[in-house]
Image (tube, coloured by chain):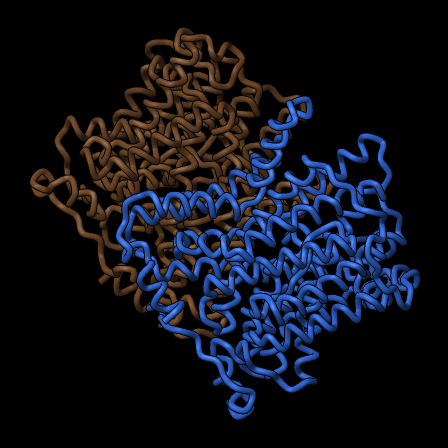
Chain colours: A blue, B brown
Amino acid sequence: MAKKGKMNYFTPDEVSKMSIEDLAKQQVIYGIEDKPPLGESILLGIQHYLTMFGATFIIPILTASAVGFDGVDTARLISLMFFVSGLTTILQTTWGNKLPIVQGGTFSFLPPMFVITGTVIANGGTSNLAMQQLTGAIIAASFFEIIIGFTGLIGEIRRVLGPITIAPTIALIGLALYAIGFDWLMQDWRIGIVTLLAMIIYSQFLRAKNRVFLLFPVLLAIITGYAFAWILTLSNVVVEGDAGYVSTQILKNSPWIAVPKPFMWGAPKFTTSFIIGMLAGYAASMIESVGDYMAAARLSGAPTPTKKVISRGIGMEGVGCLVAGIFGTGNGTTSYSENIGAIGLTKVGSRYVIQIAAIVMMILGVFGKFGGFFAGMPTAVVGAMYCALFGMIAAVGMSNLQFVDLNSSRNLFIIGFAFFMGLSVPFWANTVSVDPTLPLWQKTLEDILLTLAKTGMAVAAICAGTLDNLVPGTREERGLIAWHDVMEG
Amino acid sequence: MAKKGKMNYFTPDEVSKMSIEDLAKQQVIYGIEDKPPLGESILLGIQHYLTMFGATFIIPILTASAVGFDGVDTARLISLMFFVSGLTTILQTTWGNKLPIVQGGTFSFLPPMFVITGTVIANGGTSNLAMQQLTGAIIAASFFEIIIGFTGLIGEIRRVLGPITIAPTIALIGLALYAIGFDWLMQDWRIGIVTLLAMIIYSQFLRAKNRVFLLFPVLLAIITGYAFAWILTLSNVVVEGDAGYVSTQILKNSPWIAVPKPFMWGAPKFTTSFIIGMLAGYAASMIESVGDYMAAARLSGAPTPTKKVISRGIGMEGVGCLVAGIFGTGNGTTSYSENIGAIGLTKVGSRYVIQIAAIVMMILGVFGKFGGFFAGMPTAVVGAMYCALFGMIAAVGMSNLQFVDLNSSRNLFIIGFAFFMGLSVPFWANTVSVDPTLPLWQKTLEDILLTLAKTGMAVAAICAGTLDNLVPGTREERGLIAWHDVMEG
């Protein structure tokens, strides 16, 4: 039977006295307020950096290709992204929600990004003009999130959120990314399978045997996969052009130092429909973030985020997006699900470690060579990492179902409907497009709806949140009593 | 907190004495051994017929288009499918596993079907030759399932199946079909949304108010959606060529009576690689069926299927596939997840009702006009039904997680990994194809692996089953103790 209750966590002193067997059994090794020794913290911080590397790297790559950037500007955009992620992580962990959450670029901004840049380029605009329009939309719309956050409006949402809503919403953050898991791993199946097996063996079989596997399964698996790819490259088993080829070209071309400066691509331009279109990205990002706060708090042994914590967190994410806009990353910042997955795998939920990770990100964002070094990491390694991490997020979401009566057909209907629609609606949404000849208001409205429909966790949140609050059911059946007891009590 | 324990069920007498409010609260209204009054049973049986109509209709449509059949042969194939479904349902419920499960065509045979028919047609074969090769493969491979079943080999599998394996396996049966839910509903969004809203309102809001909504939410929602489509057609809001158009042409062209006869498309032809390729479809179908038996037993208040019940059920499914092959449906028979979803929605798990449904299927399979009548049902109505039913299957799968320790990171890793891979691997598998110039043994092997990789529930079962049995974990943590207590105790 599932055990109920708050997770335990331990001080560094207690941890050092525990046996490996005891450690492996614990829910959390370092809790939110713990400060592991500096050396260990730096290694753990680098692991978080590596965990977020894949998504943080792919977002500027996608943005750069959408606006048609050359190699030099692409590299600059990548470095920018890491620098801003570090900066906004410091803001969030110090003055925001103070949870152990890494801030980074968000996939939910990609659909409006593609719409905005696509429109500018199709009308004969330059790459820089596309970035200026994109930046303008991000900056203007960031005030929406800042206001919703700091006024406490977002906190009101929490009153209608129970485990039946939270479970599919968090789960869909991971499940909805099924297209970039195994498909990326199979870009080079040898490297992908080696990385995935390493991840499974380190995190599931060796963690009770040796402390290094308990703490660094993700980092070690990435190193294993990357080293294997390097061996294949050096021994000419894979050659240039192959997906598994480790290129040193990006490393050579990267500058040693590249200090970011504001409005790098020119002064931002503001267009109403672009700004409103971008709001859908913000809305999805906010819904996702509230789910992330819950997951991060659960995994790090912190109490369930209060209305105040959520408000401050969302407000600060808005500030982060404003900062990202000013520096011109072409994306916003949001809480990073990958790193929450890493907390689940490593059981290290220390805020201090995240802050160390943020400093690593800022430093490595300025020293261009480091970005260039990791930019050579084959996609297969990233894909293998995603198969484990996104699955972990899905399971963390489902773990909220332990509070719910799973023999109630009311609950089963709502939960299943939300999960299915969270996958089925985006599948449909990705096959349609908005008629560009529609009147502006209607096109804008349809753009917004379509952007939401493409976002699985938003669909799941809307389906489950609406039905759980409307369909008759007792508070006990819905799991609200057990959930609030455990999460807050 | 989630209630644990076997579901209650009631005799018809008890049911008739209960208030609507009490009924709505019960887990099962009619249990597996109950016989509702004949009139009610016929209506409930027709509801099951309608529930399985969508998939039973689409499989022969897909097969007919793959081999290039004309309208007349397509109609024959549809009628055949219904007749054989009814016949094999009688076999299964009377001499097989005796669970309230409708037998029907299986999506898991579609990938090998496309491979076989595609190869024959590409080599200049006729439609009938393609059907003969397909039929030969189905007949030959059916002995694999018959042997695995009746020798009890399949029962051995159950020993290594715990709730951590069953949960993602059943859930993926529903979730993996995300492509044919909302996308079909949106073929005509007005009709789709009306049908979906009807389904939600009838099954979730009105069931406690009126008995007819308690028992027939699916049937009533289909009638509502179909009637609405008919109104739109009669009032010329939708016209011929629109997706929501209700065509009476199929009805006019269908014969009154069409008695099926064996080997309708000619004597079967046997080709080794086709037979082995078809085995992958059988393997996936068997794994799915074991999950279905568990789900059906849970929903109908029957004890967990024993080794003997599973063996007899799988053996009889093999016999059903042999029968389907002899009659030439171009597909096999398997347990029908849609109808298990319907049991969850209606809470009617009576075997007698399923047998009535089987007789309805056989009669309507012979009277061609009935098939023609329902063949006119717009896709949007079917899609809306799927959004509710496939979600229900997903949730029934997840409900097995109530026995598992959801705070164990071992369990979360395995569960999440299985769910994610169950979606991510098929996504990849659908983008690749086997090199036809490979040596036959290698091509056949890759065909088999690819067919399995395309089947989400097979991937989930393999991932979860392997890891749950290999990664260290206590029997209590894995939920084996609680699960066996509740499911068998």
Which residue is rendered at x = 47% and y = 18% of the image? B244
**Residue A453: x and y, percent?**
55, 39
Residue B362 image-quadrant placement: top left
Eyeballing the image, is A351 above or below A341?
below
Query: To which quarter of the image does residue A201 belong?
Result: bottom right
* Residue at the spot 33% in from the left edge and 16% down from the top edge: B370
Q: Is residue A136 above or below residue B405?
A: above
A220 to B160, vertically: above or below:
below
| Quarter of the figure with the N terminus of chain A | bottom left
- Outermost residue toward the front in this view: A151
Q: Position of residue B226 (x, y in %)?
A: 37, 20
User: Which residue occupies 24% across, 32% down?
Assistant: B213
Image location of residue A486, percent across then percent down:
37, 69
Q: Nearer the viewer, residue B358 or A397?
A: A397
Q: Position of residue A164 (x, y in %)?
A: 39, 53
In front here: B103 or A371?
A371
Is B423 on the left-hand or right-hand side of A368?
left
Dividing the picture into quarters, in which one does residue A72 lie?
Answer: bottom right
Camera sees residue A185 = no
For the C terminus of chain A, the quadrant is: bottom left
- The number of discs equals 0
Q: Nearer the viewer, residue B27 or A30?
A: A30
Compare residues B45 and B411 and report the one nearer the observer.
Answer: B411
Evaluate whether residue A35 shows in this view: yes
